[in-house]
Image (cartoon, grey):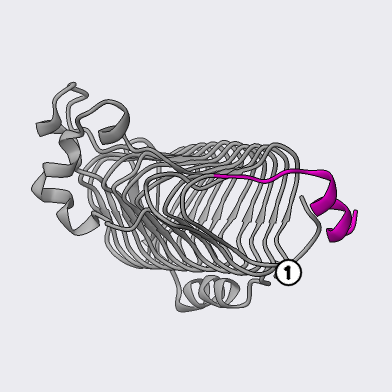
Amino acid sequence: MGKAKVAKRYVLSHHGPVQLAADLVWGRHCRVGGSEGPTVVEEGCALGDGVRLDGGVRLAAGCRVGDGVRIGHPPKAATVGLDLSASCPRVQDLLIDARAEIGAGGLLRSHTILYSHLRIGPRFSTGHHVLVREHTTIGARCVFGSFSGCDGYTRIGDDVQIGQGAYLAQSARIGNGVFIGGHTVLSDNRRALRAVEEDLFGPVIEDFVRVGVQSVILSGVRIGHDTMVGAASVVTRDLPAGILALGSPCRVVRDLTRDEIEAYRASVAGAPEPPAKGGRR
């Protein structure tokens, strides 16, 4: 379906101040803008059916947005009226003033939901039904697998891959080149109490760490750079850099060799980038 045909057939509903590129392509029942601030969609972007971009969203050039995606969903403070996390001193360095900024060349597959107060780097890619909540910073070339989620107040570096069904609790800090296997869980609550004093103790995962599928990383844990955690492990305490650890509770097995560490680092550096543009979906 060519651009001219799409523009003639479908109506793009827009509200509040908007700035739309001339070559924008969109599907049916799309809505752009709102009272929260100006919405900007740059050149070469393509929106599928039922896409909603709320006020204050900035979608950089060449982004492809699948059916039913929403960017700029109101945060908890706007929908509930109160967000105690925002006043916690442990996450003040994670707060984001901007509404929602998505870097160039992103690929957001169908039914991805991105809240407001996000800053996401270029070449961000999601599977289907991904959720990223407020006050999250994501670096360049990161991937979130289908049905994965981030509960907000989180910082993620460049070249990070989050597997399908993984869950990142609030206040996690994740370095560059990290791999987190599918259905892994990161916790931030020390005693599973419904009290903000027990929340926001997210784990710290340093650069080039690998975490196997179905693992659990408990609150307050730090995993040193270049370490590999085996599948189905439960990490209950800090792990040093450059080691292999596994089990429940997770224990150090051995040091990784330099060749093992360099092989993973090289694979991150050599990962192919997705194409900048494609079809409407």
Q: Nearer the viewer, residue 154 or 276?
A: 276
Residue 200 inside the magenta-drawn segment: no
Q: Is residue 99 left or right of residue 2?
A: left
- Give x and y (percent) for residue 229: 42, 51
- Give x and y (percent) for residue 147: 57, 36
Query: In terms of image quadrants, where is residue 187?
Result: top left
Q: Is residue 9 left or right of residue 265?
A: right
Q: Amino acid at mark 1?
A: Pro
The residue at the point 64 percent across, 61 percent down is 63
- Tell me where the magenta segment starts and ends, as one range: 1-14
The residue at the point 78 percent across, 53 percent down is 280
Q: Nearer the viewer, residue 163 or 97?
A: 97
Q: Is residue 105 left or right of residue 176?
A: right
Q: Nearer the viewer, residue 218 or 273?
A: 273
Pointer 1: what residue?
275
The residue at the point 81 percent across, 58 percent down is 279
The residue at the point 78 percent across, 43 percent down is 10
- Give x and y (percent) for residue 127: 63, 45
Does residue 184 sit above or below 260 in this rendering?
above
Residue 3 inside the magenta-drawn segment: yes
